[in-house]
Image (cartoon, helix red, strand yellow):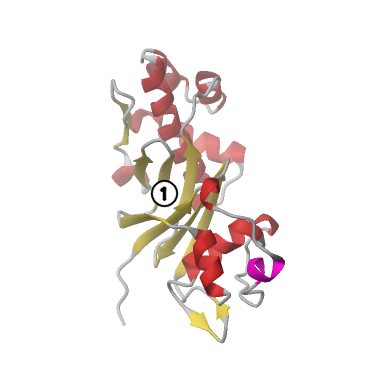
Amino acid sequence: MTVTPGVDVWWTRGSEMVATSDAQIHCRAGSVVAGIPPSWRSGSRRQLLDTAITKYAKKGGAVMLPSGHQFSLSDSGYHLAVGVGRHVPLGLDIERQRPVDDALPTLRRLGLASLATRLGELAPAARNRAFLGVWTAFEAFLKLERLKWEAGAERFAAMAPYWVVGASGTVEFRGSDRVGVFFTQTEVPGEINITAATPRPVAVDIQRINVALRARIATL
């Protein structure tokens, strides 16, 4: 069966999660996906991870991604997200929408002085919006390329001339064909900014789910 490359993103927010017993949290204790960090092996993060991956494959009670698929994880405050790349490498990052006090110094530390200058010309709300767009792109890029901070910052800084910043704080990357990285960015009003980084253009589907409800159903 031919699978069209693409990205699926599943996210949820802390206010949607309720306390669950150990039986519910570990109702799929056998569903181990290699490489997940300890912080995503229990609780609401594990619930979201299992709920998302269950969409793709289920074998003998264990949840596993099919061959050619991979995932990327992100959290920000109470917000959690799982991205699944279907036959395409993926880096995913989210940031909750909030005022950021040190936006311009942070960009300068990344070697993005020119972008910091451009953002400094914007009104505060637009500046904040633009920063969240650039920041999520940077972290998604780190995850896609599996780079450490220093090396990732150096390579990301080299792409600064390709970012276009609008007066309202919109950001757009126009260097994809030159550098081989594509950023798909989405804003969920009042919630989060989401950026998926891929090595080629693909469709990105984003859905919000209630993991607490799905976890309860899974234990019935």
Relative to 199, say whether 113 is above or below: above
Question: Looking at the image, which residue is at 50% across and 47% down?
Answer: 13
**Magenta region, mostly helix, strand or loop?**
helix
| Element type where label 1 sits in the image | strand
- Residue 34 falls in which quadrant of the image? bottom right
The residue segment tinted magenta is 22-26
- Residue 85 falls in which quadrant of the image? bottom left
Tell me if residue 79 can be seen: no
Tell me if residue 113 can be seen: yes
Question: Looking at the image, which residue is at 53% across and 34% down?
Answer: 154
Residue 149 locus on image (x, y percent): 60, 39
Quadrant holding the N terminus: bottom left
Question: Looking at the image, which residue is at 34% across and 31% down?
Answer: 163
Residue 168 locus on image (x, y percent): 29, 23
Quadrant holding the C terminus: bottom right
Relative to 141, say whether 125 is above or below: above
Front residue (pair 150, 68): 68
Question: Looking at the image, which residue is at 42% across and 44% down?
Answer: 194
**Residue placed under numbered mark 1 in the picture:** 197
- Residue 47 falls in which quadrant of the image? bottom right
